[in-house]
Image (spheres, rainbow, N blue to C red):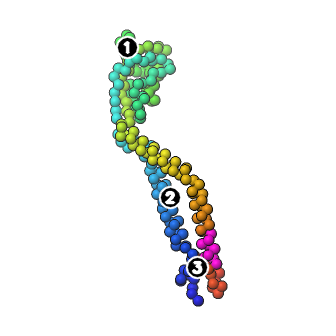
Amino acid sequence: MKKLSADKKGVFGLTAVQSFFGIILGIALLAYVIVIVIGSLGDATILTQGSGTATNETGGTLKSAGYTLTQSSLGGFTNPTITALVNSTSGLTIQLANVTTPVNGIIYNNTAIEWEAVGVTYTYDYDTTQQKDLQSILSNTSEGITSFFGAISPVYVILAVLVIILVLTVLVRVVQGNDKSMDNTPAL
């Protein structure tokens, strides 16, 4: 009598199933690493930001509701620093302590005085074209992965059922493959 563990005839495709699951596990691990890297890159500023200066930006009214800086519409607008405020009608300098330094590009007036025409000089940082392109690539890749996996979900359900049937078939063959004269332990 041949010993089952020596000739492996009773192991119906077990090595193929092990290889299949190894490949699937490797692909899943690679996809997981890619998703983590994309998520990390999306939150990081890899490239240096550009910096700009707006000199004597006019036409705004500085009231308690706030004045929105023109350059705040730039992508990645950050770190605005007001360097000068001038009342354009009278030419008087407005003290910087009378306004709240903007975080989102809106200057808030901290006094009861409302200035109708204000000239604002400030510096700011913004995303360069390269930084915008990088964000676009990361966004497109992320959306592509999401839509791909969302579109093929029925295929995964069918594949999962087939894999479960295959695994059950292999297990039944392995358990049934033992000779009655041998002990009752399955040959895995």
Question: As rendered, which of 96 and 174 lies closer to the eye?
Answer: 174
Please tell me which residue is depicted at 57% across the width and 85% down the height of the picture: 3
x then y, percent, for residue 34: 45, 53
Above or below 163: residue 4: below
Precedes in sequence: disc 2 or disc 3: 3
Element type where label 2 sits in the image:
helix
Q: Bin the neighbour count of mark 2 within 10 Å (Cα to Cα): few under 14, some 14-19, many 20 and up.
A: few
x then y, percent, for residue 96: 40, 21
In the picture of the structure, the residue carrying the numbered disc 1 is 88
Real-space Cα separation, disc 1 to disc 2, in angstroms: 63 Å
x then y, percent, for residue 60: 42, 18
Above or below 118: residue 127: below
Above or below 26: residue 146: above
Instruction: Name the side, left or right, on which 57 lies relative to 39.
Output: left
Q: Amino acid at mark 1?
A: Ser
Q: Which residues are magenta?
A: 168-176
Q: Label for residue 3? A: none
Above or below 51: residue 184: below
In the picture of the structure, the residue carrying the numbered disc 2 is 28
Kindly report which numbered mark, 1 or 3, lies closer to the viewer in this rendering: 3
Q: Amino acid at mark 3?
A: Gly
Answer whether labels 1 and 3 touch (C-beta < 8 Å): no
The C terminus - image quarter: bottom right
Q: Amino acid at mark 2?
A: Ala
Choose top left, top right, bottom left or bottom right for residue 160.
Answer: bottom right
Question: As rendered, which of 127 and 169 lies closer to the eye?
Answer: 169
Q: Label for residue 10? A: 3
